Amino acid sequence: MKSTLHLLICLPSLVFAERPNILFILTDDQAPHTLSCYGNTVCETPNIDKLADSGIVLDQAYHMGSMSGAVCSPSRTMIMSGRTLWHLPPRGEAHRKNEEGITQGEYILRNSLPAVFNDAGYDTFRTCKNGNSYRLANALFQNIRDKTCRHADDERGSQWHGRQVLDFLNDRTSQEKKNPFLIYFGFSHPHDARTGREDLLKKYGAVNCQNPPSQFFPHAPNLPISWLPEHPFHHGHPGLRDEVKVPGVLTSRSEATVRNELGREYACIENIDDQVGLVLNKLKEIGELEKTYIFYTADHGIAVGRHGLMGKQNLYEHSWRVPFIVSGPGIVPKSRAPGNVYLLDILPTLCELTGIKAPSSAQGKSIKPVLMGKKKYLRKVVYGAYCGGTKPGIRSVRKGNWKLIKYDVLDGEIRKTQLFDLTQNPDELLIEHHQKEVIEKTGNKPAANQVNLAMNPGHRKKLMEMEALLLNEMRRLKDPYRLWDQSDE
């Protein structure tokens, strides 16, 4: 009887000891194409490369969208709550009312990421930028060291965020803590102004500047093949900061401006990679690496010159998709899958990986079957929305390699439909990319079928299928708007 009682008393601590740690790394404004595991051949990220080689890379991971120009705000709230775009809780005293959705009476805050892991006996830690997030949930982490760091020095750059994680791990080691940990390791970069370290700026042929440059260094990154001097029609958000007020860019989309911004972006990302490497080495040093699930992702992508855009307030793949890399126990090294996942799937995924019951308020799905190689896709269809400017805004749906984007903005002045076969046209090139002056700048001559196919009679059936699919997703997810050619009848 005594031995049985002793076993029962010890069981909880044994369960906690066996639970894996979580290191969740989140960058600010980073598209997948900036990393070599997604095909980049210029930006050097050896530590993130090692992370990708040790685990799985998902090619089709998305944020669901935004009803605000600050796309990071609903995106990060989705991560913390596991809720879909139109079902978000109030995020703080000063939250935007238009970001608050259908909550159906659930106590969302008590079911948020830090609350769930606090209740499960984890030591929870957070370092990240200030603002544009789920502030009420952020305050629930046991250890919080937040500061917006968008400069390049040790106290105001990504180094500061990295040092906070190292200090937390050192403190745990010195105190001989046994509980598993959840570290929310957020960066303030490569968000603009993309202020880079001087050594890395020199490496990538870039300079920090307030006004658009008139010339570029020969070894600056080349223009992306989807570059345009301007978007072919208005994106629907007049006066949008990301398109007209970014330091060093303003309204310029010149070759000099875009190549300099890419160099600055890569300098910021390599600095992030340095900090990731320091933390991974520390985990290995203290014997925690092998029992830690490591996630690397971003709150959303960003254009930086692609399609004549600079910001993230659009639904092209470069801005809608996010990098998504996961390494940890049971994940096959150098594996890859499409995934079809959302950032809001993270909370139920972390719960399943750690043996914690996912809260009923979370609407996402666990990605574990994809991470463990049991499935290639989590869902067949993904939906995206942007309506931070004029309404109803922009909507998108993707199924397989077919993608539809629709624009209904500026009080009906702009109503456009785009249909892409991403197998043939992965960069979503438009007829404007076929212009001689664009080809001369990018060095890329598109194939004849690398255009918007919405007006192609041969794709009429596919267009109608995708239109119906989009409306179905808008209904299912309680999208409060309808586009000009949609009806609920």
Image (cartoon, rainbow, N blue to C red):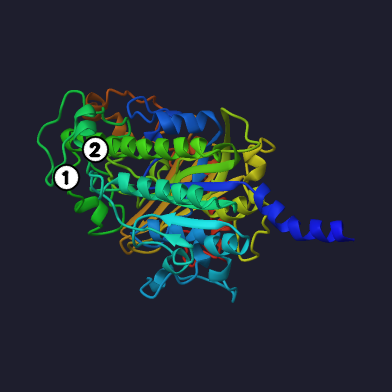
- Residue found at the far right of this picture: 1
In the depicted view, which residue is nearer to us: 88 or 28? 28
Question: Please, is residue 131 above or below residue 256 in the view?
Answer: below
Under circle 2, the secondary element is: helix
* Mark 1 or 2, nearer chain start: 1
Picture residue at 62% right of the left edge, 31% below the top: 332
- Residue 98 screen position, x and y as percent: 40, 70
Kindly check if marks 1 and 2 are in contact, taking CB atoms under 8 A apart as contact. yes
Picture residue at 59% right of the left edge, 54% below the top: 179
- Residue 218 screen position, x and y as percent: 17, 23
Please give left or right for residue 405 compared with residue 146 in the image: right
Q: Nearer the viewer, mark 1 or mark 2?
A: 2
Q: Specify the quadrant of the image occupied by residue 378.
A: top right
The alpha-carbon separation of the residues under discs 1 and 2 comes to 10 Å
- The amino acid type, in three-letter code, at marker 1 is Gly
Quadrant containing the C terminus in the rendered view: bottom right
Under circle 1, the secondary element is: loop
In the depicted view, which residue is nearer to us: 437 or 272? 272
Please give left or right for residue 219 compared with residue 295 in the image: left
Q: Which residue is mark 1?
A: 248
Picture residue at 45% right of the left edge, 43% below the top: 322
Q: Specify the quadrant of the image occupied by residue 82.
A: bottom right
Question: Please, is residue 222 above or below residue 401 in the view?
Answer: above
Q: Which residue is mark 2?
A: 264
Please give left or right for residue 47 compared with residue 271 in the image: right
- Residue 323 screen position, x and y as percent: 45, 40
Quadrant containing the N terminus in the rendered view: bottom right
Question: Please, is residue 254 above or below residue 179 in the view?
Answer: above
Residue 299 shows in the view: no
Question: Please, is residue 33 above or below residue 20 in the view?
Answer: above
Q: Which mark is residue 123?
A: none
